[in-house]
Image: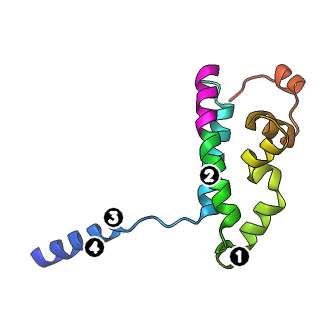
């Protein structure tokens, strides 16, 4: 029994010591999803949203550079990488918004087809 308990403890410590492996594209997509979720969150104030989007912009810019320069994406996730690069405007929000001299929120809304008038007539629902 003691031996089984020691073996279990060793196994748990090995599993928890291993870092989670995610490629650069997964990290970018996770950060982008968090940014869009904060962008659409009605429970935070405008100054809070603005502050979060500025910090998110920095993280997205760094992650986008990493993805653009990641040579391993060709071999490890070719379909996902191809899909990401084909939808450049939505995958690389920070860079695409900078190219159009826009904020990330404005660029994302225009790319998915939302206009100011659409947002003004929208109702909040859950």
Name the residue: 60% across, 48% down.
Answer: 31
The secondary structure that most of the magenta stretch takes on is helix
Instruction: State the residue position of label 4.
Output: 11
Mark 4 or mark 3, whichever is nearer to me: 3
The part of the chain drawn in magenta is: 45-55
Q: CA distance from mark 2 to mark 1?
A: 20 Å
Instruction: State the residue position of label 3.
Output: 16
Kindly tell me whether residue 31 is visible in this rendering: yes
What kind of element bears circle 4?
helix
Mark 1 or mark 4, whichever is nearer to me: 1
Mark 3 or mark 1, whichever is nearer to me: 1
Q: CA distance from mark 3 to mark 1?
A: 29 Å
The mark found on residue 74 in the picture is: 1
Classify the position of the N terminus by image quarter.
bottom left
Q: Position of residue 11 (x, y in %)?
A: 27, 73
What kind of element bears circle 2?
helix
Q: Position of residue 4 (x, y in %)?
A: 17, 76
Quarter where residue 86 is shown: bottom right
Instruction: State the residue position of label 2.
Output: 62
Relative to 47, is 96 on the left or the right?
A: right
Q: Looking at the image, tell me whether mark 2 or mark 4 is earlier in sequence order.
A: 4
The mark found on residue 122 in the picture is: none
């Amino acid at each position: 029994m003691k031996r089984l308990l020691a073996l279990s403890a060793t196994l748990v410590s090995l599993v928890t010591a291993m870092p989670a492996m995610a490629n650069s594209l997964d990290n970018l997509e996770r950060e982008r999803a968090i940014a869009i979720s904060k962008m659409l969150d009605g429970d935070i104030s405008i100054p809070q949203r603005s502050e979060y989007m500025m910090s998110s912009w920095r993280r997205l810019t760094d992650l986008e550079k990493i993805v653009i320069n990641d040579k391993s994406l060709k071999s490890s996730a070719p379909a996902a990488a191809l899909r990401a690069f084909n939808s450049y405007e939505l995958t690389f929000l920070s860079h695409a918004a900078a190219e159009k001299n826009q904020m990330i929120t404005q660029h994302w809304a225009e790319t998915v087809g939302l206009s100011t008038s659409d947002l003004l007539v929208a109702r909040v629902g859950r």
